[in-house]
Image (cartoon, coloured by chain):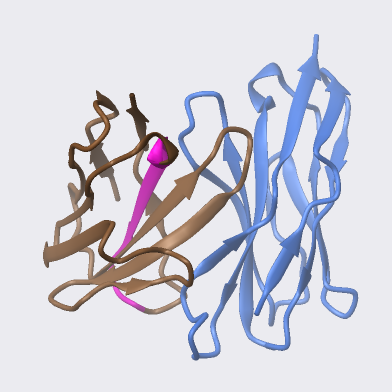
Chain colours: A brown, B blue
Amino acid sequence: GAVVSQHPSRVICKSGTSVKIECRSLDFQATTMFWYRQFPKQSLMLMATSNEGSKATYEQGVEKDKFLINHASLTLSTLTVTSAHPEDSSFYICSAQRTVQSNQPQHFGDGTRLSIL
Amino acid sequence: AQTVTQSQPEMSVQEAETVTLSCTYDTSESDYYLFWYKQPPSRQMILVIRQEAYKQQNATENRFSVNFQKAAKSFSLKISDSQLGDAAMYFCAYRGNAGGTSYGKLTFGQGTILTVHP
């Protein structure tokens, strides 16, 4: 149980386009979802926290107009990278948990490798 | 703010041997969770073990065990009888449980790449 699906797993697109990444909790309802960014052989850096029905909370230094997060239902959160540029190329991972409580386990998606040409 | 430090960028171990990965953290909170995650080349994040700060007993999961030293803010992972499938990047992570802006968020260390030699 507790499966999180992330789509697409890999995307390559031209500079200037917008890219949407989906994060779905398949067998549970997720009140809270997190979006992380990971550069090769580096750590996961939290970008934002989204709670269903609320605006996402962004970490310091993350441009909210650049990385649009929507969490409109209890099973789906989306991350849209707007007007993507080569420096946005990275590995993006989402995680989901049933409630906002800290004792709830975070279940991770398999990640999306984004390459901007 | 909480910080997590893994001072070993890379470690290696012979198959069937034991290896210990180090992790230290800094926090002013007394109530929190600590985790070790494994990230194989597939990039999937796999939870290895979890420790609750209020529990003095060290967590164990089969071949994986931790040495949790709360006063020293140290949380090392011991892998016994290492297997080829243990090769991965290992991340130590902290999660606060005391409210505030860090509540519920995972803070990861830099990671340690573990190589297992046959």
Pick the residue in front: A79 or A105: A79
Indicate whether B67 appears above or below A114.
Answer: below
Q: Is residue A89 magenta?
A: yes
Given the current orientation, which residue lies at the most extreme top position? Answer: B118
Q: Residue visible at 63% across and 85% down? A: B31
* Lateral position of residue B108 relative to residue B47, left or right: right
Which secondary structure is most common in the magenta stretch? strand
* Lateral position of residue B75 relative to residue B88, left or right: right
| Residue B116, quarter of the rendered image | top right
Q: Residue visible at 81% across and 33% down? A: B10
Quadrant of the frame with the C terminus of chain A: top left
Q: Is residue B21 magenta?
A: no
- Tell me where residue A85 appears, x and y as whole percent: 34, 38
Indicate whether B13 appears above or below B63.
Answer: above
Q: How many marks?
A: 0
Q: Which residues are magenta?
A: A88-100
Q: Residue visible at 17% across and 72% down? A: A52
- Tell me where residue B96 appears, x and y as whole percent: 57, 78
- Tell me where residue B48 appears, x and y as whole percent: 60, 46
- Tell me where residue B65 appears, x and y as whole percent: 76, 50
